[in-house]
Amino acid sequence: MPIGSYSTNYPFQTPNPYPMKYKKLWLGFIVVIVGSFSVLGYYGSEIYRQAPPIPNKVISTSGQVVFTAQDIMDGQNVWQSTGGQELGSVWGHGAYVAPDWSAEWLHKEAMFFLDTWAQQAKGTTFDALDVETKAMLQARLQKQIRNNTYDPATGTLSISDLRAQAIADVSQHYTGLFMQDPALAKYRDAYAMKDFTVEDPERMRKLNAFFFWTSWACVTERPGQDISYTNNWPSEELVGNRPSGDLLIWTGFSVIILIAGIGLLAYYYASHKEDELDPSQLPKEDPLLGLKATPSMRATLKYFWIVTALIVVQITLGVVTAHYGVEGQALYGFPLADMLPYSVTRTWHVQLGIFWIATSWLATGLYIAPAVSGYEPKFQKLGVNFLFICLLIIVAGSLAGQWYGVMQKLGYGENFWFGHQGYEYVDMGRFWQIFLLVGLFLWLFLMVRAIWPAFKREVEGRHLLGMFLISSAAIALFWAAGLMWGQHTNLAIAEYWRWWVVHLWVEGFFEVFATVVIAFLFVRMGLLQTHVATATVLFSTIIFLFGGIIGTFHHLYFSGTPTSIMALGASFSALEVVPLVLIGFEAYHNLTISRLTKWIRAYKWPIYCFIAVAFWNLVGAGIFGFLINPPIALYYMQGLNTTPVHAHTALFGVYGVLGIGLMLFVLKGLSTRRRWKDGVIRFAFWSINIGLALMVLISVLPIGLMQTWASVKYGLWYARSMEFMQTDTMEVLRWLRLIGDTIFAIGAGALAWFVIGLKTGHSLEDDIDVTSDFNVPEESQTKEIPVEV
């Protein structure tokens, strides 16, 4: 169904008088993709080869079999069913209210050794000893606990009888904590754990086996090396876990690369700076005014209703989750943890954030594809509606499964397939993962069939359309990385594939897709010529992916990976920050655009969202990202509240605000031509952004910096302990978050009210939009204009 006729009335449609040579840019893109994924694949195989081994059995000197491989693997499944990385963390990845179980187990096990020896030698505790005796016992401990006694020929891990006793002692503590020991009630409250987080003693025994294995990997030296499987993470002086020389060297190298990259990009920007926008060359009226929405384009409206609802629910869950930090088992006295424990609310908070951001972006793609091609394929609306139903089923089904898993109502296999996988951002059961993958390929099919007619035409925009199709295909394909681990996959290997999804899917190709979509929007509005947009998109993609693909490894410094992963991750992830240094120019460019002509001002709030995205890209992804990125910084900060500083300002500040901006842009195109009332949407925009800033600056960031001090001075276990986190100062800082959270939540409510008002009319003025810089006859305001690039 053609929905427009070809015309050359606007700048984005005019032929380029100086045809650009895209060959070098496409060649650069191909080299970056092939080269980067070759490196990612090769060193991924090294992670498989050098992952911490899971012993067939752990046996004491006296012959006692302490644990078997099946115990450890089943224990990993139990951990996942409790919420996994949504309740405390392992190897620094996960939530931040409860301890890091691997670091805390290691400290408790070490203290059992030292206290036992101190009692035998001096009849007192280790802390009461003199400095010389302490040093002697620590050296004795390090010699025993760091020595790798795993026999790869038999798959047996041999331990001393004293270590077996230490394991039994720590296991007893965790059994009481995860079940219902009254003496540990204050710990459960501090850690936001419900009573009977684990209900079955046998499941608890296996969970202890898994925790022991994760701590064993933290302290046991790799064969032939003097560093542990986790590169000596966490910091723990008692067992000799200190930053390695390699860690310090690659930290310095990453800073040098960052400085060099900034210099080179600044030179390129200065030498290729585009001319300033000339308002006289812009369209005199809104080029989108006459765009006739097709049935499938109009069918995307309900997606944005769901996006709005999910935003409100997600932020509400975020408020509840944050409150668990000060009242671990209740909400202002109400025993909410009995029905919705912390690990469930945090899971849903994270999962719904991914859902609504992705839904907004994907729906924008479904809206733009027919507008770009000028063609509505047969049954396109049916496909859009069917995909919407699938989305609702996936959201409801996956959230319900996660609740059943955390409430311990599913077996190991059922939880893996339908419940809670325990891996942050990809918590949904395997069945729901596959269902979503099918949905993404259906979305890709709908996108390709709608855009393909435009791609086949010999027009300048073909290169930009090519990037549009490639980024769309990548969104579908890279979600499949989440299917690469199984129910019993080694945690180091599962983490490798998880970050393919989190870093490459969410932070990588979604960003490329967003860049292309924004370029299309500005081209359609006559604010960019096609050849300029194409060159900019290709160059930006090359720069971003050059650092971003291999930079995935910076998440894996301490996840049971070899030193080469740290070297590559530190070097290439530093390059990810380079483009963000010049992001202020993008913000200024978008601000200038928003003020050029009267009709552009009708798109003020979508464009302001793009400006906010540029700001949060610099602050959240750039400054706060690099704060925790160098190996020496992350060595002490991994698993602390400095990470959610980056996560909130980058995930919501960049991707979330961009999703809101894209939603507003589409709603502007789908709504009537009446002007929007500025009051509510202005309040929502500023409240959301100011609330996010306050949440971070007066609460989460100070907590993270204080934890960093504690981690450097005493070790990560202490920075995450109840003794440190429940001090009066930390309590005040957690309550201060209420200020930013409240402003932020009110802003989200105002946004929802505004979107509802576009349907009911209370967000609309009585008069029509100002669509030109001169008096336009009414009939010209409703004419159809071409929709083709």
Image (tube, rainbow, N blue to C red):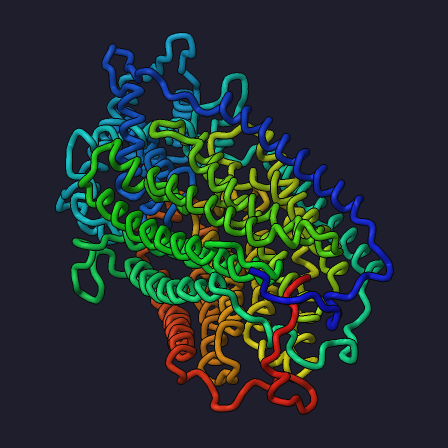
Note whether residue 424 is visible: yes
Q: Quadrant of the N terminus?
A: bottom right
Note whether residue 731 is visible: no
Task: From the viewer's perspective, tell me whether residue 608 is left or right of residue 182.
Answer: right
- Residue drawn where x is 51% and y is 58% of the image: 366
Question: Residue 423 location in percent, x, y?
Answer: 38, 41
Q: Is residue 687 above or below residue 512?
A: below
- Residue drawn where x is 48% and y is 47% of the image: 637
Q: Is residue 591 above or below residue 255?
A: below
Task: From the viewer's perspective, tell me whether residue 44 is left or right of residue 317.
Answer: right
Q: Quadrant of the C terminus?
A: bottom right
Question: Residue 638 location in percent, x, y?
Answer: 47, 45
Looking at this view, is 432 or 584 the one in front? Answer: 432
Q: How many labels does the image show?
A: 0
Task: From the viewer's perspective, tell me whether residue 232 is left or right of residue 535.
Answer: left
Q: In this view, does 293 lie above or below 82?
A: below
**Residue 522 occupies quadrant:** bottom right
Task: From the viewer's perspective, tell me whether residue 522 is left or right of residue 529.
Answer: left
Looking at this view, is 67 or 784 the one in front? Answer: 784
Furthest residue in direction top, as rendered = 153
Question: Residue 433 location in percent, x, y?
Answer: 38, 41
Looking at this view, is 310 or 176 the one in front? Answer: 310
**Residue 199 occupies quadrant:** top left
Question: Residue 483 location in percent, x, y?
Answer: 42, 34
Furthest residue in direction right, as rendered = 18
- Residue drawn where x is 49% and y is 79% of the image: 672
